[in-house]
Image: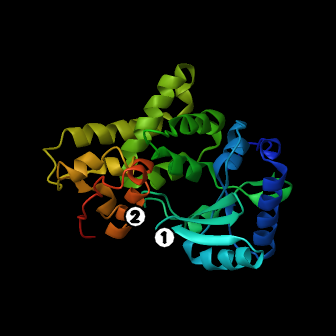
Amino acid sequence: MPTAPLAPSLEEEVAPDTAAFYRRALRLLVDADIPFLVGGAFAHACFTGIRRSTKDLDLFIRREDYERVAALARAEGWEAELTYPHWLAKVYAGADFIDLIFNSGNGLTPVNESWFRDNPEADVLGVPVRIANAEDGLLSKAFIMERERYDGADVAHLIQANAEHLDWPGLLKRFSANWRVLLAHLTLFGYIYPGERHRVPQWLMDELTARLAAESAQPPAADPHVCAGTLLSREQYLHDVEQLGYVDGRLTPVSTMTEDDVARWTEAIPARQLDPALPVAPSGGLAA
């Protein structure tokens, strides 16, 4: 499959000391032959040309490689912590840090071998590295719909800059049972860029709208009282699970999260840290 040309990355947007830390970390991982992929603002700049300052460097790794990465970091005198065991670790050099991502915050997209296929290559801060595929980047951004952060514009820009190069069948497969989220973003893309709706394959829109029509024609769902909104926002649907008795979508088989993961991730919400008296979401989910 052809790939879009990669735009320059973010050398000018990173402070020199921070860039030196990132550069050293990237070279250590390359030399140690530990699989990783650059994501976040660096990858987004490569795929879209949108340059913006970033507070960190996002690296996608497999969970089973974390201990090796942590050992390398500690040998350099840096700190390494498994911040949220279900999806995120961090490496610190003073105030600077690197995010090591091995799942999504909602537990839907664990990083596995499929992420490391046919990745584009780019120089990031002068280090030749592999970049997370645009499809995986789009998938990870599609579910970020917090009150304080919504990545829908990033999704639209990824499509606008790469529509002819995206693996659309692979993207549909990645979304799997969450195809309504993909349809929502594609519908918004057609609204945002009305003159470019044709760049999304017609077969894909036909497939998704046919699924929607078929599902809408079915009798009321016999599914349990589930709120999947928590897969989109860890905070904005807590009322549904805490007060209205909905089953948390993160505790259904679509997610890898456990009750402890949900509780810890909920406690990390900034508003909860400011007011510890706020309730933590009650446990309860569906058996796999």
Residue 153 locus on image (x, y percent) = 55, 34
Q: Are marks 1 and 2 in contact (CB under 8 Å)?
A: yes
Assign a secondary structure to mark 2: helix
Pick the residue in front: 239 or 224.
239
Q: Position of residue 225 (x, y in %)?
A: 17, 53
**Residue on which the image places disc 2:** 264
Residue 134 seen in this snapshot: yes
Q: Which mark is residue 254?
A: none
Q: Which structural element holds mark 1?
A: loop
Q: Is residue 40 left or right of residue 171?
A: right
236, above or below 97, in the image: above
Which mark is in front, 1 or 2?
A: 2
Give the amino acid type for the residue marked by disc 1 in the picture. Pro
Per the model, the C-alpha gap separating discs 1 and 2 is 9 Å
Q: Which mark is residue 85?
A: 1
Q: Nearer the viewer, residue 200 or 9?
A: 9
Residue at x 24%, y 43% (from the top left corner): 215
